[in-house]
Amino acid sequence: MANTMKTGSGGENEQQQLSLSTLAARQLATTTKSRPQMQGISPRWLLRMLPWIEVPGGMFRVNRRLTYTAGDGRLSFSNIGARVEVIPRELTELPLLRGYVDDTVLTALAGQFVQREFKTGELIVEAGQPAEHVVLIAHGKANKLGKGPYGDDVILDVLADGDHFGDQAVVEANDRWKFTVKAITPCTVMLLPQQVFESFIQRTPALSAHVERFKERLRMPQDKQGQAAIQISAGHNGEPVLPGTFVDYELKPREYELSLAQTLLKIHTRVADVFNGPMNQVQEQVRLTIEALRERQEYEMINNRDFGFLHNADLKQRIHARKGPPTPDDMDDLLSRRRKSRFFLAHPRTIAAFGQECTRRGIYPGVAEVQGRKVISWRNVPILPCDKIPISEDNTTSIIVMRTGKDDQGVVGLHQTGIPDEVEPGLSVRNMGISERAIASYLVSTYYSAAILIPDALGVLENIELGR
């Protein structure tokens, strides 16, 4: 019998090989391969849930009824250490100063603001007291309180960085605060006395004329949304003279131009010709490039400053989290500001934080089925994950809710289909030829935008704190 054992150099017995090793056998075997995988591909719920409108001319105009009242804006501030200063041009975010262009007056006016610090629980203004200041909140958070029907305090709104109030007191004589504002965190507040503001108006003819035009707009018949009122008579008897009316439109409606995302895909012809089986190299390169392009498209629709939802939500439709983490109360506040809310969008970490708050209260959110998938919901409105919603360095983020569709005056996506070399709706892959280095180039482009048809179609819950 042959000896199957041998002694190695280390003095240990080693088993003699009796058959072909798997390492050698693999040299003759066919390897089963996967398609190229890619991190960063998300469900892209926003692109899937939005109804898309065809824009053949590349421009979409949103016509609305005329609105007399200037929309409230938020102000930004600068600081040197603990000293805060009002940026003069930011004062034009106040409705009273919207459209005023004299930088000299604005600079002088900004220099008259006085900085005040309020501790948690202190009253910034009190209901019933004379309204003698324009108040700008530079930093912190405060509750705007009113009296309920049974005499208890009711939270009317949550004010935070950049919010303001009191500018109406300048145009209303002997005005008194109709609400109380109470600091719920330490607040840095900039105050401008009403007398100082009025003296500026009296000394500056151009500013005085600007304020008079603002007062004239306030006297125009308006509905509760600030739109030019449609005069209607109802419940009358006999033959009274009926009011004449017409529906006025904005003279400068907003127009959305299709944006784009593009990249130049390059593939060496040797790769495409020789190393092209069993998978098509060009197809796989194009497929992964399209995935990346669609991810960027969704990011831009949320974060782009020109048309992205976080920057274009109406300021009256933005609310602040009451205590930090997203609570059921915050979600209810967000839903109450619009009809037919279709879905929430939130970062996965935000959804987890909301679930923790529900667990803490002993509440169990519902489950909704969306396109064959089960997701968490609140009040039967699905909460869809979207990792494109940013989380800031201080660990705060936002939740978006929207009503969608043209018929419901909601949010719509904009695109143009039928473009040359189209491979998906609104996305084309165009062959640009082969260079002298034998590299084939493909221009991959997608054209898109989004429009908010009326302000209450989109709402944002801001300053949500994560990690508590």
Image (cartoon, helix red, strand yellow):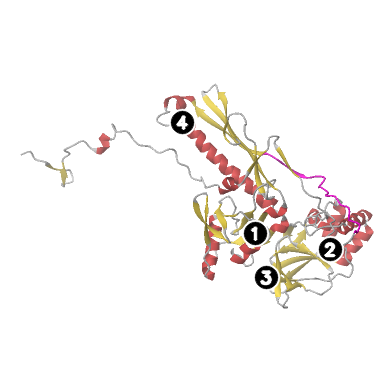
Please name the residue shown 84% across and 71% down the image: 176
Q: Which residue is mark 4?
A: 281
Q: Secondary structure at mark 3?
A: loop
Q: Which residue is mark 1?
A: 462
Q: Which residue is mark 3?
A: 184
Q: CA distance from mark 1 to mark 4?
A: 44 Å
Q: Secondary structure at mark 4?
A: helix
**346 in relation to 19, above or below:** below
Q: Nearer the viewer, mark 3 or mark 1?
A: 1
For the residue carrying disc 3, how many other residues have a C-alpha within 10 Å: few (<14), some (14-19), or many (20+)? many
- Mark earlier in primary sequence (2, 3): 2
Q: Quadrant of the C terminus?
A: bottom right
Residue extending farthest bottom: 151
Please name the residue shown 34% across and 35% down the image: 31
Residue 254 drawn in magenta:
yes
Range covered by the magenta-colored residues: 239-258
Amino acid of disc 1: Glu
> Residue 85 lies in what quarter of the image?
bottom right
The x, y position of residue 423, in whole percent, is 55, 33
Amino acid of disc 2: Gln
Residue in front for this viewpoint, 435 or 217: 217
Q: Secondary structure at mark 2?
A: helix
Residue 33 placement, left or right of 200: left
For the residue carrying disc 1, how many other residues have a C-alpha within 10 Å: few (<14), some (14-19), or many (20+)? many
Please name the residue shown 84% across and 69% down the image: 132
**172 in relation to 148, above or below:** above
Residue 415 drawn in magenta:
no
- Mark earlier in primary sequence (1, 4): 4
Q: Are marks 4 and 2 in contact (CB under 8 Å)?
A: no
- Mark earlier in primary sequence (4, 2): 2
